[in-house]
Image: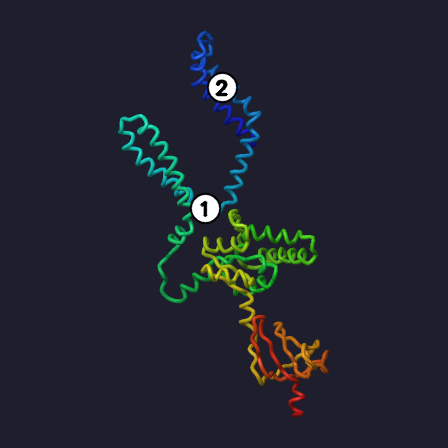
Amino acid sequence: MLRRIIQACFLIIGGTLGIFLIPDLLLMLNLEDIPLINNPYSSAVLGALIFYLITFWAVDYVTGFVRWAEESLIKAPITDLIFGSVGLILGLFIAFLMAFPLNAIQVPVVNTVAPTLLTLLLGYLGFQVGFKKRDELLHLFSTRKKKSGEEEVEKEAAGALKILDTSVIIDGRIADICQTGFLQGTIVIPQFVLEELQHIADSSDVLKRNRGRRGLDILNRIQKELAIKVEIYEGDFEEIQEVDSKLVKLAKITGGVVVTNDFNLNKVCELQNVAVLNINDLANAVKPVVLPGEELNIQVIKDGKEHNQGVAYLDDGTMIVVEEGRDYIGKRIDVLVTSVLQTSAGRMIFAKPKLLEKAL
């Protein structure tokens, strides 16, 4: 279909040029006696025929260029297109206003060449300014007056876009969090994250492949089973290579919140003043508080690093180191908490069997 449209455009251009140019060309060649010079219909047909023959060579190149331009426009974020177009229009409008006094000057170079150069120059500058300053302009237009009352502020924050990264999708807990209703607003899944997830799912490594497929299943569950709005962001930032950097850029443009469990991405977002939700922080926040002296019923499952230690785990994964607990491996016992240690890897609880406490 596209080839036929291009060929039709070539025929129209050829016919139009034939009407205006072929008679003058014949006059230049002293071929005034040929009837075509006085017959615009014949000139149009001849011009259209010439350009139709040219299409056999040029149509593939033109089709390739049109498809490339189409793909580039589709991949470009809508904000880039809008602000670039607005800048272009403003540049052309300024050039139009500046051309008025130049046309009044009776100097051939000034009133003909200068307006053309101004149009090209200001149009280009307007597009570049609108394109490269889009983030600042978007922030300027999106700035609102602070609403009175904490309820309005919380409502606005809850409605922000939640942009998922690859790690939090593969992790899987995001689906349960959405199901409980703790994550409100619209879930945004960028196309470049989907591509990375698909690349992981197609990996030759079995572990990576299983993780990628699990991530795709999680997305399918979020989109089809949960009562939450999900959107796919089709845009891309081709000038940026790293997916994490693209996520930060997208969050800046849309004013959204990055949802992740990646420690490094969390730090990058904080450095660039981008809102971020780390589900690991959420998991640590909701862990039950255990104080020294409290009693727990646990099952010792393996040896500890030190002599005669046993190791057990709470339901949330918190490790409990049981002193003198090696003899109780495979058994459920009551223990008393002696101390709680908070480390970078999480929380660790130290305890000792209650039976030993009674014996003492």
What's the mark number on residue 62? Answer: none
Count of numbered circles in the view: 2
Residue matched to label 1? 80
Question: Which residue is drawn at the image coordinates 55% and 32% (left, top)?
Answer: 63
For mark 1, give the secondary structure: helix
CB under 8 Å between callouts 1 and 2? Answer: no
91 relative position to 264: left or right: left
> Which amino acid type is marked by label 2?
Gly
Quadrant of the image containing the C terminus: bottom right
Instruction: Look at 52% across and 57% down and name the residue there.
Output: 163
Residue 83, above or below 1: below
First along the sequence among labels 1 and 2: 2
Q: What residue is disc 2 on? A: 47
Give the colouring mode of the picture. rainbow
Image coordinates for residue 347, horizontal then vertical, percent? 58, 74
SS for dot 2:
helix
Residue 74 shows in this picture: yes
